[in-house]
Image: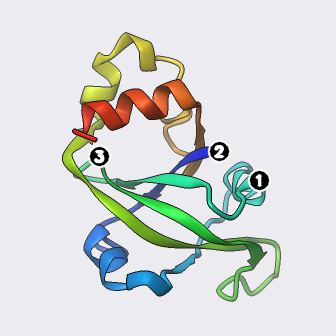
Amino acid sequence: MKYWLVKSEPGTWSWQDQLDAGEEGTFWDGVRNYQASNNMKEMKFGDQCFFYHSVKEKQIVGIVEVIKEYYPDHTDEKGRFGMVDVKAVKSMPTPVTLADIKAEPRLENLALVRQSRLSVVPVDEPSWNLICKMGGL
């Protein structure tokens, strides 16, 4: 299993929206960056992702699981990009902010810190475990 972080603007798709999608989950569409898209192509069924509220909140608020691997994104008129489907697994008891992550030296190489503009980034297992601990899991 691999670990990831996916970003969403809460005004566009929030953690509550993801929770409301239930066990059926929903598609993760709208990614229009080739590197982020390539990361999505690497996602496999069962991989887990931190759900990150971007823009003003800048915090990890939950965990989703990949339930359908990469396929064409119906919102991409040119057919260049794809999407995956995800379902909510659990909420973070304590959201982990970007400031918290940047303050932790063991997370200095995390893609969220180094490539902050990417909407889909990998997370190594030690960082995943540390962030889960920071969030009360």
Residue type indicated by callout 1? Glu
Q: Is residue 100 left or right of residue 49?
A: left
Q: Residue at x 47, y 34 (%)?
A: 128
Q: Earlier in the sequence, mark 1 or mark 3?
A: 1
> Is residue 110 something that shows in the picture?
no
Residue 137 % position (x, y): 28, 41
Residue 134 % position (x, y): 26, 31
Q: Residue at x 28, y 17 (%)?
A: 103
52 is higher (above) or lower (below) than 112: below
Quote the CA–CA distance across marks 1 and 3: 24 Å
Q: Secondary structure at mark 3?
A: loop
Q: Nearer the viewer, mark 1 or mark 3?
A: 1
Q: Nearer the viewer, mark 2 or mark 1?
A: 2
Residue located beneath label 2 in the image: 2
Q: Residue at x 82, y 81 (%)?
A: 79
Query: How was the colour assigned to the protein in this rendering?
Result: rainbow
Q: Earlier in the sequence, mark 2 or mark 1?
A: 2
Q: Secondary structure at mark 1?
A: helix
Residue located beneath label 3 in the image: 58
